[in-house]
Image (cartoon, rainbow, N blue to C red):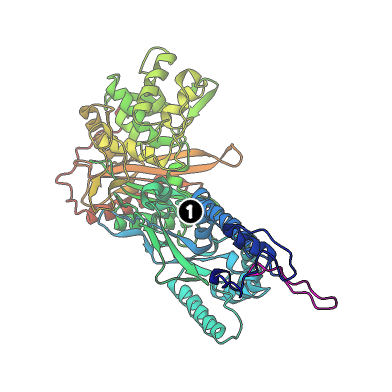
Amino acid sequence: MSAPQDPRRRGVPGPAGPRGDRRPRQDPARRPAERRRQGGPSGRPAPRPRPGAPQQLRLGSPRPRLRLISLGLTLVMLVFVVRLLQVQAVDASAYAAKANLNRYIPVKLSAERGSITDRNGVDLATTVDAYDITAAPDLLTPKTAKTHDAPRQAAALLAPILGKDQADLEQKLTDNPRSQYVVLARQQSPQVWNQIKDLKSALDDAAAKGKGTNVLAGVNREAHSKRVYPNGDLAAGLLGFVDADGRGSAGLEQQLNKKLAGKDGKRVYAQSGGHQVPTGDVREQPAVPGSDYELTIDRDIQWAAQSAIADQVRKSGADRGYVLVQDTRTGQLLAMANAPGFDPNDITTTDADALGNAAVSDAYEPGSVSKLMSMAAVLQEGVARWDTHVVVPNRLPRADRAFADDIDHPTWYLTLNGVLAKSSNIGTILATEQLAKTKRQRNQILYSYLRKFGIGRPSGLGFPGETPGILAKPQDWSASQQYTIPFGQGLSLNAIQATSVYSTIANGGERIAPTLIRGARGPGGDFTAAPAPKKTRVVSKETAKTLAGMLESVVDDQQGTGAKAKIPGYRVAGKTGTSNRVDPKTGRYRGYTASFAGFAPADKPRLTVYCAVQNPTKGSYFGGQVCGPVYKKVMEFGLKALQVPPSGKQPGRLPVSYNPGQ
């Protein structure tokens, strides 16, 4: 009987296998590993493939591939992170600037130019709405505009509206294709811009329907005020004009340009396709308007002066002429008229020689109106009185010549008053020879008085192109100048200086620097008065009063040369002038300068009027005949416009001559 089988060994080969071979017992802990190595789940050896049987595919581990993919993604992300840091941190400002350059459009906000008015607030120069038509050439390139000839199409559409040459417009649009700004036309009216705007809208509608492209997408406008002179040529030489860029180019427009112009502002807005993005960012720096200036000029008196001188220049066939009116009490100029003039609204058809202000830029020899200064020196120095006797021969030999008066005459027996009334050159030389014992001393004394009156130095206006005149130092006077300067030849001045000489006597011997500006009103509306003009004592009140009486003899006495300047009801003090004229083209004497200067009422002066006509060729060339009537017309109008009462009493006439036997 066989022994019972151990249940724990059931199914397990015993020490001796089926074939009797014995195998060592294995450690149970190592069995799983062995099974894995042997490939079977129970530890049995994997069956060997039979010859001819298909091989079994074994899959590799996925973990290496996952690691490779992860590494690749990490490198890609690292590249993006580095680039992002470069764009947003390192080069942020540069890229932002490029973005703004392409997206944002800068527009200049032009400041409104200040107005210029007369003393009563009447506009002499003002501004109206206008536009500069601009374009962005970079929006007209083939790539942006989606057409190869956008600049040509745009130029063809704009030329008839702007009144410009099509080729010129096309060149502006193609000169710099990268530019975002070019000016096509300046100071166009609102109506012109409305036409362009309507045309742009029509092109937009067509483009939306797929019919072409809007070649005017880059065309815009800038508000740019246009300068207008409501009174045409009135005071044009004084006001000047502005150039195409709106800058003052002459006259007060140039002198006051910085204050009149104000300060431009700037507006930057987002755009797309040539149109502002409604919700886009807008940055704006407002413009600061220019100051308004109030002049001392009276428009009505200016009109009277300009009409009178223009008429006389035309009648005399003269080169030019000017008239100035000054308030003797304040030095304020009430009129400054030139003929011929020009219209500052359109200077394209005006002769360049007429564009300036000849009243301040012309330097000429004044002639006998200058004798007043010589007489002032003689009286102030006390070497003669108004009634001093002066024997005036027909000829006076001095230096290298014999001096004469404007007419041949027998020996005259004149008072010093008569020398001025009859405008005797010889008598003036004889009077100034009494200033000192030597020529050198005489010349120095006369020179000092001429300088006090403002000759050879700026008038104080600071006007563009103003000449100080010519007055050589006394040691440089030639032999003949020592005798010609006392009667107004051999020195030169401008019309402002000549006017100021007579206003000085009218004001009791005190010179007040001439002024043109009463004050300015800034952007805030506050009015600032102009600084008080400089005052200089030239001669005493007594001397000035005596000279005023002597000047009355020139107009009122039958022997005086200024009878045509009489004004009924008013006492008039004045002096004629007729001088040889230096031709500015040749530098030689040719023709004459006719002039008249004076003030009224002589007993209580209010206005000074000065008139000069250069090179009259028709009729008389004497100052009393040519300028006397102009003086009368302008002075009479001015006195009535200012409601100056007539003189209360008639003057006591000073003797012009004396009887040598008495």
Tag count = 1
Magenta run includes residue 42: yes
Q: Which residues are magenta?
A: 40-57
Residue 501: where, in percent of width, then height?
A: 33, 35
Q: Between residue 459 and residue 136, name the one nearer to us.
A: 136
Residue 452 appears in view: yes
**Horizontal relation, residue 140 to residue 124: left or right:** right
Q: Considering the numbered disc 1 on the image, is that residue within a helix, a strand or a loop? A: helix
Q: Residue furthest bottom?
A: 209
Quarter of the figure that contains the C terminus: top left
Q: Between residue 144 and residue 117, name the one nearer to us.
A: 144
Q: Residue furthest left?
A: 648
Question: What's the residue type where badge 1 is placed?
Answer: Ser
Residue at x 22%, y 53% (from the top left corner): 642
**Horizontal relation, residue 68 to residue 620: left or right:** right
Q: Local crowd at mark 1 within 10 Å, few (<14), some, or many (≥20)?
A: some
Report the predominant secondary structure element of the magenta stretch: loop
Quarter of the figure that contains the N terminus: bottom right
Residue at x 37%, y 24% (from the top left corner): 391
Residue 318 appears in view: no
Residue 27: where, in percent of width, then height?
A: 60, 57
Residue 175: where, in percent of width, then height?
A: 65, 60
List the residue tagged with mark 1.
Answer: 316
**Horizontal relation, residue 96 to residue 454: left or right:** right
Residue 597: where, in percent of width, then height?
A: 35, 42
Magenta run includes residue 366: no
Q: Between residue 137 and residue 65, name the one nearer to us.
A: 65
The quadrant in which residue 368 appears is top left
